[in-house]
Image: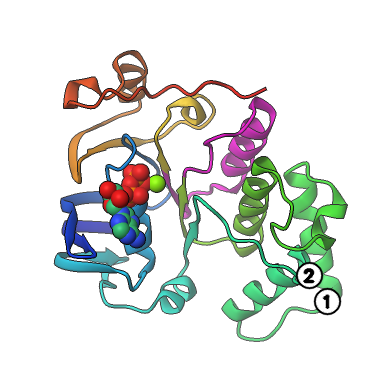
Amino acid sequence: MLEVKDLHVNVEGKEILKGVNLEVKDGEIVAFMGPNGSGKSTLAYVLMGHPKYEITKGKILYNGEDITEMEPNERAKKGLFLSFQYPSEVSGVSVSNFLRTALNSKRESPINVIEFRKLLMEKLQLLKMDKSFMNRYLNEGFSGGEKKRAEILQLAVLEPKMAILDETDSGLDIDSLKTVANGINKIKTNDRSILIITHYQRILNYITPDKVYVLVNGKIVESGGKDLVNELEEHGYAKWGSEESTSEEVKA
Ligand code: ADP
Ligand code: MG
């Protein structure tokens, strides 16, 4: 489904990604791990086509098609979805209106309001979220956990073929983490793939990845199966010269 080949990316003239290769097949959950500043978010932005990130070499293929130069909205229409590490607050736009507009932009004809409400209720229930959530302004005054739940709700409503989740897990308390992980597991189907970008191994106790990549200093230093997560849990990123650990203190 998604193939990244020898990707080199500059941000403000500095090379951040130094030849990244990555493959996500149909229906796979792939974990992309690395310490702070290794370039994980850079990869996420580049996959969505953020204009600030300059690709100097390499390419991105999506279902065999070269999307390296494609506009972000075109990528979204093709089924790519990025959940941000730091979602923005949008005052005056309710969660419900936002989701309906987003869904309609992907559809040929707009969804009927009643039908949409039904769909939204169903997804809220699936994710064990309160109904009142849909009338609140998007991310305004949301706690960290609520912002992440809102992202997962988007995922459930928009049903993208390829979801890229950038640090959806960091800073969550254990209940929110479980809800988010559960939501991701429920959304996952045989033709839907998920790229989980994370510093910490914690969320991978609830979601089993098919493949794991480790990024350090803009390069993939190791890849493997789910067992790699346990190895990282024990030793952190020290092997590659980073002192950072892969475990996060659980917030009360
Ligand atoms: P990670 O998500 O793994 O923590 P990032 O991709 O956010 O890493 O950052 C990798 C490096 O690129 C860091 O050194 C960061 O300072 C730099 N960087 C990322 N985005 C920008 C930007 N928009 N402007 C300037 N530097 C950036
Ligand atoms: Mg990041």
Q: In this view, does 88 lie to the left or right of 224?
A: right
Q: Is residue 100 left or right of residue 164?
A: right
The x, y position of residue 106, in whole percent, is 57, 77
On residue 116, the disc is 2
Look at 57% across and 40% down and name the residue there.
185
Magenta segment includes 36: no
Q: What element carries label 2?
A: helix
Look at 44% across and 72% down and name the residue there.
78
Q: Is mark 1 within 8 Å of ligand 2?
A: no
Q: Is mark 1 on a helix, strand or loop?
A: helix
The x, y position of residue 109, in whole percent, is 67, 86
When asked about the image quadrant of residue 45, the answer is bottom left
Q: How far apart are marks 2 and 1 (CA)?
A: 5 Å
When asked about the image quadrant of residue 95, the answer is bottom right
Q: From which residue to which does the magenta span run? A: 167-196
- Kind of residue at disc 1: Val
Mark 1, Cα crowd under 10 Å, few <14 / some 14-19 / many 20+, is few
Tell me the residue that label 1 is attached to: 113
The x, y position of residue 87, in whole percent, is 57, 56
In contact (CB < 8 Å): disc 2 and disc 1 = yes
Look at 62% across and 39% down and name the residue there.
180
When asked about the image quadrant of residue 42, the answer is bottom left
Q: Is residue 249 above or below residue 89?
A: above
- Kind of residue at disc 2: Phe
Q: Is residue 38 left or right of residue 139?
A: left
Magenta segment includes 177: yes
Look at 52% across and 36% down and name the residue there.
170
